[in-house]
Image (spheres, helix red, strand yellow):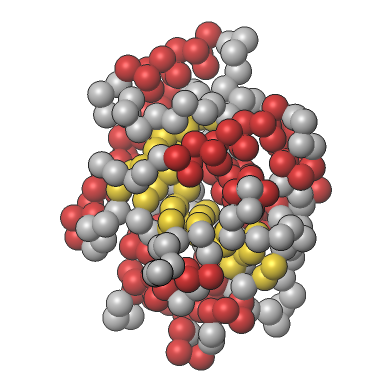
Amino acid sequence: MAKKQARIAAVANEKGGVGKTAMVINLGAALAKMGKRVLIVDTDPQHNAGSGLGIELGDDELSIYDLISDPDSHNPADAVRPTHWKGLDLLPSHIDLSGAEVELVDRRGREGRLKTVVSGLVNDYDAVLMDSPPSLSLLTINVFAACHEVLVPCQTQPYAFRALEDLFDTVNDVADEINPDLRVSGVVATFYDKRTRVSHMILERLKKDERYRRLLYDTVIRNNTTIAASSETGKPVVFYRSTSNGARDFEALAREFLRKKPGR
């Protein structure tokens, strides 16, 4: 029997501060806790996903920067780092990745560098989750070219809601020009605070808006200080404090992620 194809999903939003990296780390950890094999690919030069998993690279260790800048000289598997938790691996980023934009701009096939890297790794995993840069860039295009689906965290604030349209336009453009398999598979409300009117208002807009309502996950990631505290310790919240609201929310998100089939 043929091995089931891994789900390759980017967690992306062109607005920063919406809970993107926290979602990558904690969704990945929740899936691993459920027995899935998960690879987190960190394509953000700030390398916060690695820090959130307690991994700091030495100067001589391979990162995603090495793999996309000089793909013929490195085996992608050599850059993968196991985390402290079974089934959860990391393909780490590095601050040097910020210079990749300039280095790759005139190179042939520049939009597909990451896809080539990931294609050599996916057979070992059930899910590949990519943390993308918080702005549109060549790195973001590489992420979208390499994945099948985009999961969009939307902070329950007006600015974040307004930014969704730009992201959807970008995804559609990449699907038209580079990756016809790409689609937005879900929108997840984040930083939800039931005590505030604005959180209620934005969640209701997401539920009613024709563009987003069919993509909106039932799971809501509540505003929870334990999520931030866990990232400071380099431990996903599902392992840091399993009884917290943050852990419960991400475990619910993982179950819903597995149930949902990517589709337009």
Q: Residue at x 57, y 22 (%)?
A: 192
Q: Residue at x 40, y 69 (%)?
A: 1
Q: At which x and y percent is residue 120?
A: 46, 77
**Which residue is farthest front?**
1
Depth check: give the residue in front, 148 or 74: 148
Q: Quadrant of residue 190?
A: top right
Q: Can residue 93 be seen in the rendering of this structure?
A: no
Query: What is the quadrant of the C terminus in the image?
Result: top left
Q: Is residue 47 left or right of residue 165?
A: right
Q: Residue at x 30, y 77 (%)?
A: 109
Q: Is residue 21 left or right of residue 228?
A: left
Depth check: give the residue in front, 27 or 200: 27
Check the image and report above or below for 60 versus 45.
below
Check the image and report above or below for 262 versus 93.
above
**Which residue is farthest bottom?**
73
Q: Can residue 36 be seen in the rendering of this structure?
A: yes
Q: At which x and y percent is residue 218?
A: 47, 26
Q: At which x and y percent is residue 76?
A: 53, 79
Q: Quadrant of residue 95?
A: bottom right
Q: Residue at x 54, y 74 (%)?
A: 65
What is the total number of numbered labels drawn onto the structure image?
A: 0
Check the image and report above or below for 236 versus 83.
above
Q: Quadrant of residue 247?
A: top right
